[in-house]
Amino acid sequence: VILNGCEHDTTISITVDPDINVNLGPDQSICIGDPRPVLDAGIPNAALYEWTLDGNPIGGNTQTLQTTVAGIYAVRVTTTSGCVDQDAVTITITNSLLV
């Protein structure tokens, strides 16, 4: 850029963060009495983990969540740079699994 007969250079550094991919895995059907699955958002050290059960806020700001009852568990993850992704999984508890 030339300004008042003088030439000026400006350098801007841009860091592009990789996409995040939150994946709670496939829906799960477990039997009564089986251990309840632990869900993992899979993005370590994110700024925010927002867990819900059937659309209602639950849990804390943690990467993993111990499930307790049947329902639709979802998590929305926000990284420290502001990238956001979310996923959901349905946990079904049955008397027996059909084979």
Image: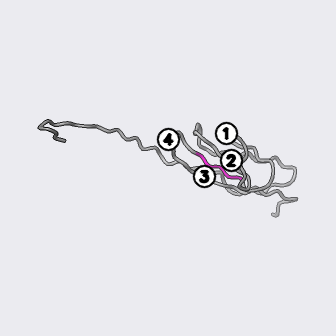
Q: Residue type at mark 1?
A: Thr
Dot 1: what SS?
A: loop
Q: Position of residue 32 (x, y in %)?
A: 87, 53
What label sits on residue 51 in the rendered view? 2
Tags 2 and 1 touching, CB below 8 Å: yes
Give the residue type at disc 4: Ser
Residue underneath mark 1: 62
Q: Secondary structure at mark 3?
A: strand
Residue to which mark 4 is pinned: 81
For the residues labelled 2 and 1, the Cα–Cα distance comes to 9 Å
Q: Is residue 8 magenta?
A: no
Q: CA distance from mark 1 to mark 4?
A: 17 Å
Q: Is residue 48 left or right of residue 56?
A: left
Q: Tell me which numbered mark, 4 or 2, is placed earlier along the sequence.
A: 2
Element type where label 4 sits in the image: loop
Q: Is residue 72 above or below residue 37?
A: below
Which numbered marker is on residue 86? Answer: 3
Question: Which quadrant would residue 11 be assigned to in this image?
Answer: top left
- Whether 76 is among the magenta residues is yes
Q: Quadrant of the N terminus?
A: top left
Distance between the Cα atoms at labels 3 and 4? 16 Å
Q: Amino acid at mark 2?
A: Trp
